[in-house]
Amino acid sequence: MAWADDQIAKPMGYEHAVLFPRARDAIKAYVEVTARKVLGLPSNICPEAFKAAGDKARSQEIDQATGLAPNLAVQLYGYRNEVSAPLEIDPLMTGWVGRPCCESTIISFGFKKTLNVGCGGAFLTNNTLLAAAMMDFGFWPGGDELTALVQKELGRIHWRRDVRFEQIKRWDAALGDLLPRIPMEQVMPWRVMRRVPDWGPKDKFHDRSKRDTVVAAVRAGRIPVGTNYPPLTGSNKWGDEVINFFPEFEAPGLAADSIERALYG
């Protein structure tokens, strides 16, 4: 669609946009069109994305401190790995504020994404032949109404990014050094990411249940908190320790108090 080429693909450094009902549909089409033998995916990606790649999917272990697979162009949690590859999977559109690092990319407009419209995704590419082949699988489910909603959100993307960074700054100030930060900086703000390691000089807990104890304490104060998808390969340090807060929920001080009581009594 011409509007998607101009308003989505070109701002992200691409020429062509092919629209899909969901990002996972674009993954499925890409695997089929390119006849890929293997598509590497991090072990903590959404299980539906892994299913979409079918028997071509190969799970890859991640850096236990960042949650990213170092040599995969799969962007998670608003952080960005600039890895050169045929395909980038970028659900939160971190490439909106950077340069393309791959020939093609897949983005999402689903719930809790940067373009939070509830459905839709896009395949972006500079390869004209590949774009034409992907068009045979593309489908835009919402017509003019969904198009107008996406266009409205695109017009707000820089404003929303600035607001979210300000919200995250307030959470960072309140949480301080209570919990370790992820050793990267988000380029597209999503949530306030932290880890609850199973060690500490003063805490009462010394096993992987400590994260769950902190989550329970924060939720008891009616403050929402997330723990992400469980790893596809089973329990690991990242999956057991990661915790994230919703920056738009303006209660960072209350959350910090709950965490401190849970850790130190």
Image (spheres, grey):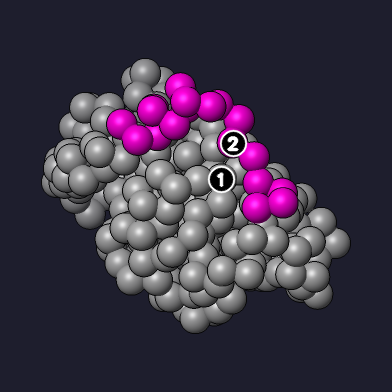
**Residue at left offset 79%, top offset 61%:** 32
Q: SS class of the residue under badge 2?
A: loop
Q: Can residue 28 be seen in this view?
A: yes
User: Label 1, on which residue?
Assistant: 19
User: What's the amino acid at mark 2?
Assistant: Trp
Q: Distance of mark 1 from mark 2, alpha carbons?
A: 6 Å
**Residue at left offset 30%, top offset 67%:** 98
- Say which quarter of the image contains residue 235: bottom right
User: What's the amino acid at mark 1?
Assistant: Leu
The correct choice, above or below, for 166 with respect to 141 in the image is below
Residue 149 within the segment the image draws in magenta: yes
Q: Where is residue 31 in the image (x, y as percent from the top left)?
A: 74, 63
User: Label 2, on which residue?
Assistant: 140
User: From which residue to which does the magenta span run?
Assistant: 135-152
Whether residue 178 sits left or right of residue 63 in the image: it is left
Q: SS class of the residue under badge 1?
A: strand
Q: Position of residue 124 (x, y in %)?
A: 50, 59
The answer to whether the residue labelled 1 contacts the one labelled 2, judged by CB atoms less than 8 Å apart, is yes
Q: Where is residue 65 in the image (x, y as percent from the top left)?
A: 45, 67
Whether residue 103 sits left or right of residue 80 in the image: it is right
The correct choice, above or below, for 208 with respect to 170 in the image is below
Task: Give the label on residue 251, or none.
Answer: none
The prevailing secondary structure element of the residues shown in magenta is: helix
